[in-house]
Image (cartoon, grey):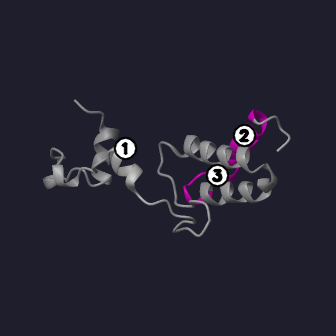
Amino acid sequence: MMPPRMVRWLIDHGYVTEPDGQASTPKPEHAARIPSLSELMRRPVTVGSIANGKPDMTPIPAGSRNNDLHAWAYGRLLNHPDNAEAIRRDLFERGQTSGLKESELETIWQSIRRQLGGDR
């Protein structure tokens, strides 16, 4: 028996279909294949990215928003404390597009600052 939340996630990400409103078993052709370490090591290293150096601003689905936003902004602030204001703006923008209220985002930001010693 699988929790309904996991079933919904599988359906939402294309791993299963919903014939007649019921979830079916996963189909191998929809399963994401994880590359082996040797395949990853053979991939060319590129400088720059598709995002042209801009952070990922895609909305985060409900269920992981607070944790994912915290980790995302924490890592950026830890590594780029000189860019704190832009990181805070990005946190609020991405958080709001993900459906969080400003008060929740302020709580996340203050938590990050406390964890990093409040000087960032």
Residue where numbered disc 3 is placed: 101
Q: Nearer the viewer, residue 8 or 58?
A: 58
Residue visible at 63% across and 43% down in the picture: 70
Q: Main secondary structure of the magenta part?
A: helix
Question: Could you tell which of marks 2 and 3 lies nearer the N-terminus?
Answer: 3
Label 1, residues with CA under 10 Å away: few <14, some 14-19, many ≥20:
few
Highlighted magenta segment, given as a residue range: 96-115
Q: Which mark is in front, 2 or 3?
A: 2
Residue where numbered disc 2 is placed: 112
Q: Nearer the viewer, residue 34 or 106?
A: 34
* Tags 2 and 1 touching, CB below 8 Å: no
Q: Nearer the viewer, residue 74 or 106?
A: 74
Identified by mark 1, the residue type is Leu
Identified by mark 3, the residue type is Lys
Image quadrant holding the N terminus, namely: top left
Residue where numbered disc 1 is placed: 37
- Is residue 97 covered in magenta? yes
Q: Residue furthest top?
A: 1
Residue visible at 56% across and 55% down in the picture: 99
Estimate the x, y position of residue 35 in percent, counting from the top left. 32, 48
Identified by mark 2, the residue type is Ile
Label 3, residues with CA under 10 Å away: few <14, some 14-19, many ≥20:
few
Question: Could you tell which of marks 2 and 1 lies nearer the N-terminus?
Answer: 1
